[in-house]
Amino acid sequence: MGRRSRAAWISGLCAASLMTSVPAYAVAGGTAAPGGAYTFAVKLDIGDGKRSCSGALVDKQWVLTAAGCFADDPKNPKVTEGAPKWKTTATVGRTDLTGTAGTVTDVTQVVPSAGRDVVMAQLAKPVSGVTPVAVASAPPAQGEELKVIGFGRTKTEWVPNKLHTASFSVDTVQDTAIGITGKDAAVCQGDTGGPALRESGGRVEVVAVNSTSWQGGCLGTDPAETRTGAVDARVDDLGAWVRQVRYRPVFAAAPWKKATHIASGYFTGGSAGGTRHMDMIVRWNDAEVTLYQGADDNDPRHPFAAEYQVAAPPKKGETSIWQHAMQITGASFGGGADGLVVRWSDGELTQYTHVDAKGVHGEKKLAKAKNTLWPHATQITAGRYTANQQRDDLLVTWDDGRVTLNPDLDTNGVDKAQKVLVNKNTTWPHATQISAGEFSGKKTMDLLVRWSDGEATLYPGVDTAGFHGESQLFKPKTDWNDATVLNAGAFVGNERMHDVLVRRENGPLSIYPALSPGGKPKEVKIVG
């Protein structure tokens, strides 16, 4: 590779790639992969022979590969999310292309990763009989040996029928890319997007994907070119993004019309000011409870990155406690991760100090079953209504029109220190959904109320002294007339401008990013 600077080296690689139509390529000098190994390898035929690339199956329906494969100009790998511009066929589980093993299917959409030559390509149908390869979580190290595999050219074959493999050494490690050099091989045309693999202790994982190469020794390259270096795009730090992309179809296919309750919070360990956003808990009409983990980017169309079942629906002839949940709200009890407060059909009120992918934990009974008070609670929402306090209070509306506040729920419970914010009246029984959120930048949280006629109102800076003005977001019988379930939280940003998730009557799910008093709410559809 010589002694040139890193910047000059990359510039040279880009110049070298001008000799071909696609910038990164196949394993010249490598050996054919042993039978049965690397069945997760993918051959991509783009535009009926226009381009040929490689990739790796990282989910039964998703392939990790290079953005340049799908770009108008492969040397400038910018791709728009959606259907690929050219018809693309993927062959998976067939390391010998003359055989019939594996699956051949179309690519239906590509999702690019911002700032690097990487995309996730969705297949038209899930692949069976092939175990997807894991995405690495540890960064590559200088001097580390990686295995590169691909279907591209070799020294003697223009269009080889077999997957080839060779060892490469990591020369340099940058924020988004690595420089590698083949020990006895080069990366040649046909392997754009092919994986660079870490193999250790019987485990194989993708560290990077091929991006650009000198192509020294590849068939069709100038014989004077002997350099075997290449630049690969790192993926070891894209694990959360990969999980988020591959679960999108599952999230979109969920029966959102059957979502009866939504609660938000940092249930899985995120925190305000961090890179990851709030999680969401959904209780469905069959008593299943699902946890959606917040994403770490700022895309309002895809605010969640993973899905976990907290409670399964009861089997035939059995029952579940979650069948009896009347209201739920996320709440912070000062332990670093949020929990839940649940009001049950028999009037019992329960606090769970922590919720994670395995279930609810730390049960604390706040009000006993069959009491005479809590069956009259119509809505509950936990929030920071006491200034300079890290633990949440509980705001409650009652069927006689009262609105009360229980400060520091974890310390005081519900039997003492209760504040009456509104006395009995005929207005508040019409509050059909309420949610605590940060919209106005006050020292304490605001209260979002959706009324039975569809009107939506914000009450800024609610505290133990009561309400301090109001702001109308939507007029009666307009935008939120069919808003059946809603919840506020930091789903897109972690600033003090919360978003609102809305599940409409017939199932569509939307988000209103950074809702604010006096502003014009902007709806972004997530599902439907």
Image (cartoon, rainbow, N blue to C red):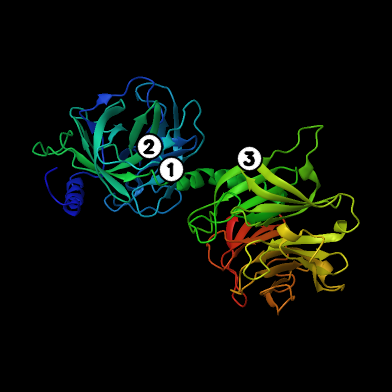
Q: Where residue 117 sits: x, y (%)? A: 33, 48
Residue under pointer 2: 206
Viewer-side residue, 501 vs 479: 501
Q: Where residue 465 sits: x, y (%)? A: 74, 76
In the displayed orientation, state which residue is furthest to the right: 372
User: Which quadrant: the C terminus?
Assistant: bottom right
Sequence order check, earlier mark of 1 and 3: 1
Q: Which type of secondary structure does the marked residue at label 1 adopt?
A: strand
Sequence order check, earlier mark of 1 and 2: 1
Residue 475 appearing in the image: yes
Residue under pointer 3: 358
Type of amino acid under label 1: Ala
Q: Which type of secondary structure does the marked residue at label 3 adopt?
A: loop
Q: Residues within 10 Å of mark 1 (few under 14, many from 20)?
A: many
Marks 1 and 3 sit apart, C-alpha to C-alpha, by 30 Å
Q: Residues within 10 Å of mark 3 (few under 14, many from 20)?
A: few
User: Image point 14% across, 39% down: which residue?
Assistant: 227
User: Which quadrant: the N terminus?
Assistant: top left
User: Image point 78% across, 61% down: which residue?
Assistant: 379
Residue 507 appearing in the image: no
Relative to 461, say whether 282 is above or below: above
Q: Which type of secondary structure does the marked residue at label 2 adopt?
A: strand
Left or right: where 488 falls relative to 313: left
